[in-house]
Image: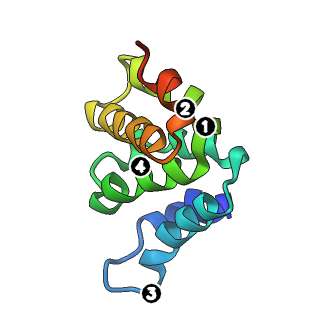
Amino acid sequence: MLELVSSPSLNQADGDSKEVGVPLHAWRTLGQIGSDQAAEPLVAKFDALFDDDWALGERPKVMGMINEKAIEPLATCLTEAQHDEFARAMASDSLAEIATRQPHCRERVIPG
């Protein structure tokens, strides 16, 4: 699944092709199965996807489905200045999604 998310040819597919939706469906699948192994590789792609409207809307939902295993890589992305501002915003939105879906994680996501 991670290969589909990372595939340059799929991520740069023509907007009218059938292939263009493959990475989006792969993200969703990884989220739905709660793949903790996917958290770090998905966050690592935030900088490459900052101008992708689908990514901006879908990645936070996916990270919310992965839940607390995504907190550490998201927090790292959020606090490292070398990341694009939209990537950092996506990390922030993802952390908020985790706090919403998993109230027991709220204090780890939004410290007192």
Amino acid tagged 4:
Pro
Q: CA distance from mark 1 to mark 4?
A: 13 Å
Report the disc number at residue 68.
1
To which quarter of the image does residue 26 belong?
bottom right
Judged from this view, the residue extending furthest toward the top is 112
Return the residue at label 4.
Answer: 60
Per the model, the C-alpha gap separating discs 2 and 3 is: 38 Å
Task: Say if mark 2 contacts mark 1, CB within 8 Å.
Answer: yes
Nearest to N terminus: mark 4 or mark 3: 3
N-terminal-most mark, 2 or 3: 3
Q: Residues within 10 Å of mark 2 (few under 14, many from 20)?
A: some
Res 34 quadrant in image: bottom right
Q: Earlier along the polypeptide chain: callout 4 or callout 2?
A: 4
Q: Amino acid at mark 1?
A: Glu
Residue count near mark 4 (Cα–Cα under 10 Å), binned few <14, some 14–19, many ≥20: many
Q: Which secondary structure, mark 2? A: helix
The image quadrant where one finds the N terminus is bottom right
In three-dimensional space, the C-alpha distance between marks 1 and 3, rounded to whole angstroms, equals: 33 Å
Q: Identify which residue is drawn at 27% across, 50% down.
A: 51
Q: Nearer the viewer, mark 4 or mark 2?
A: 2
Q: Which residue is tagged 3? A: 18
Please state which amino acid type lies under the numbered disc 2: Cys
Q: Residue at point 32% right, 57% down?
A: 57
- Mark 2 and mark 1 lie on one chain; the one further toward the N terminus is 1
| Distance (Cα) linking label 4 and label 2 | 15 Å
Q: Nearer the viewer, mark 4 or mark 3?
A: 4
